[in-house]
Image (cartoon, rainbow, N blue to C red):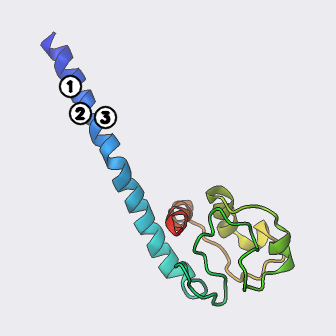
Amino acid sequence: MSLNFSIKQGLCGLLLALAGSQPALADDLAAKGQAVFERDCSLCHTANAGGANIMGPNLHGVIGRQAGSLAGFSYSQAMKDKGAVWARDNFEAFIAQPQAAVPGTYMPYTGLADADERKALSAWLSQQR
């Protein structure tokens, strides 16, 4: 009986540890996403409140925003016509291959091949609100 109790106690401890690590895992993912942004995106984009549009639009609040809708930025007609709201999944698909996802986009970026980096980038951008 005490062995059974020890196993249950150990499992409960493991579950509590895992539950407690979720925010840390999310923070780690977002930190990785920020690094990806700085490495791959910051030459053309800002992502801070009130940030300027550079070559590309400010990505602050992009997750949850209508594609091609940021005031003050001149989007391609293809991006304006996309008609979707950027969610993490369709943003990740776009950033994987921008020209394939939105034929006619002005974005010259060839794409982010690493799925984990795309997930991290979208996680970080979803926090930029």
Tell which of 65 and 86 is nearer to you.
Answer: 65
Horizontal side of residue 51 vs 108, given as left or right: left
Please say if the residues under marks 2 and 1 sit with CB atoms less than 8 Å apart: yes
According to the picture, the residue beneath numbered tag 3 turns out to be 15
Horizontal side of residue 75 vs 37, given as left or right: right
Disc assigned to residue 9: 1
**What kind of residue is marked 3?**
Leu
Q: Please give the name of the residue rendered at 67% of the width and 84% of the height, measured from the top-left corner.
A: 56
Name the residue at the top extreme: 1
Quarter of the image for the C terminus: give it: bottom right
Q: Please give the name of the residue rendered at 60% of the width and 88% of the height, measured from the top-left corner.
A: 52
According to the picture, the residue beneath numbered tag 2 turns out to be 13
Please say if the residues under marks 3 and 2 sit with CB atoms less than 8 Å apart: yes
- SS at mark 1? helix
**What kind of residue is marked 1?**
Gln
Name the residue at the left extreme: 2
Q: Is residue 74 above or below residue 70?
A: below
- SS at mark 2? helix
Give the crowd class for mark 2: few <14, some 14-19, many >=20 residues within 10 Å: few
Q: Position of residue 81 (x, y in %)?
A: 86, 70
**What kind of residue is marked 2?**
Gly
Q: CA distance from mark 2 to mark 1?
A: 6 Å
Horizontal side of residue 89 vs 41, given as left or right: right
Quarter of the image for the N terminus: give it: top left
Q: Position of residue 128 (x, y in %)?
A: 52, 69
Q: Quadrant of residue 50?
A: bottom right
